[in-house]
Amino acid sequence: MNDADRRTKLMQLAAGAVFLAIVVVVALIVVNGSGSGGDAENIEGAAEVSDSLSGIPQNEMVLGDPSAPVELVEFGDLQCPVCKGFAEEILPPIIENQVKNGEVKLDFRNFTIIGPQSVDAGAAALAAGTQGRGWNFVELFYKNQGIEDSGYADDAFLEAVAKGAGVKDLAKWNEDRKLLRPKVEETTQEAQQLGFNGTPSFAIKGPGTKGLETIGTPNSTAAFEEAIEESR
Amino acid sequence: MSFPSEDILRRAIAFVAALGVGVATYIAIAESGGGSPVCLAGGTGCRTVAESSYSHVAGVNIAVFGVIGYLLLLATAFFANDLARFGGFAVSLGGLGYSVFLTYIEIFKIEAICQWCVASAVLMTILFLLNATRLIAYGGNELQEAR
């Protein structure tokens, strides 16, 4: 092959590569541009959440058998994208195994650090908790979480999540979420007193611990399982 | 149209790619040094970007891909053949495309700008222009190998 032929081939390859790159970038942007969450008109995943939690007792914000020997406490902010990541990737196996078999109960407590709507959302979750739907609310909120502190978590969004979470008495929920705001502030202070400065942060209590012990932010399911094992 | 000599282009590519290795390494180390990612009150641009779900692909920090890309580009500067010319062009094209995507995500999805990511995008753009010039001016010209 002479230089001219090689050159023609190379230029054809280069043009093909440029075309391919443009197609891939446009496709990536289109795929990522849709379904950004935070849309009250389009709450997704309600059935999935309901299925994953069905059959597990819920008492206010505690998920699992009330007499479970180990209590794992999550201090989270519903607007926090890292908390969403934990809820979707790290905690499900713990719920599926240790919580379902009665070894562990999971307690969600608000630690609102991101913005004023974190308090609104947290109180709305507690209000859903009074109707046995607290964890459905939390999980469904995470599934539909919008851009951090962008103002999406307004009344319409919270009500849509409550409906999707299966809150039966919306009038009571509406009343309760106003009354429960101080409780959100209370757990936020508790988290600060425990020395936490980011969400999600975790603490654990069991026969092997001296009261509620902080475990920070374990970064894998295995790390949680180890902490649970040590607290038994 | 007159182009700079391939030697000058190669030196420029090596220089900019070395800067890129530095920037991407800094991002990779700065992020991994923070322990488990958590949400913090009043996070700054870089922290917000680093904590977003877009900062990792298959569990790997994308800055690591950046380091690998810049190292490959640095390597292509040491050879004067068509494989290096096309390889440099292809890697920098991929890098530029990914930088465009990430900049879009930063502006429209995460709504935060991290100056280190911007620095990397600028370096990758320069590398693409240098590599495209090199390929257009010297591609297919094996006689240039000795220069």
Image (tube, coloured by chain):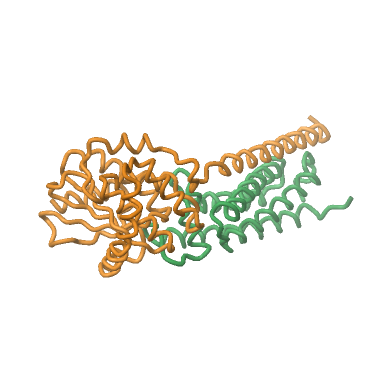
Chain colours: A orange, B green
Q: Which of B70 and B139 is in front in this view?
A: B70
Q: Is residue B130 left or right of residue A53?
A: right
Toward the left, the furthest residue is: A207
Q: Where is residue A21 in the image (x, y as percent from the top left)?
A: 66, 40
* Snapshot quadrant of residue A123: bottom left
User: Is residue A204 left or right of B86 when viewed as pictured?
Assistant: left
Location of residue A194 with respect to A33 vertically, above or below: below
Q: Which residue is drawn at 73% across and 53% down?
A: B130
Q: In this view, does A186 lie above or below B138?
A: below
Coordinates of residue A116 in the picture (x, y in percent): 43, 63
The quadrant in which residue A178 appears is: bottom left
Residue occupying the point 58% across, 49% down: B69
Q: Which residue lies furthest to the front in this view?
A: A171
| In the displayed structure image, the side of residue B87 where residue A181 appears, left or right | left
Give the residue at x 42% y 66%.
B41
Determine whether A6 is above or below A182 in the image: above
Front-lying residue, A143 or A161: A161
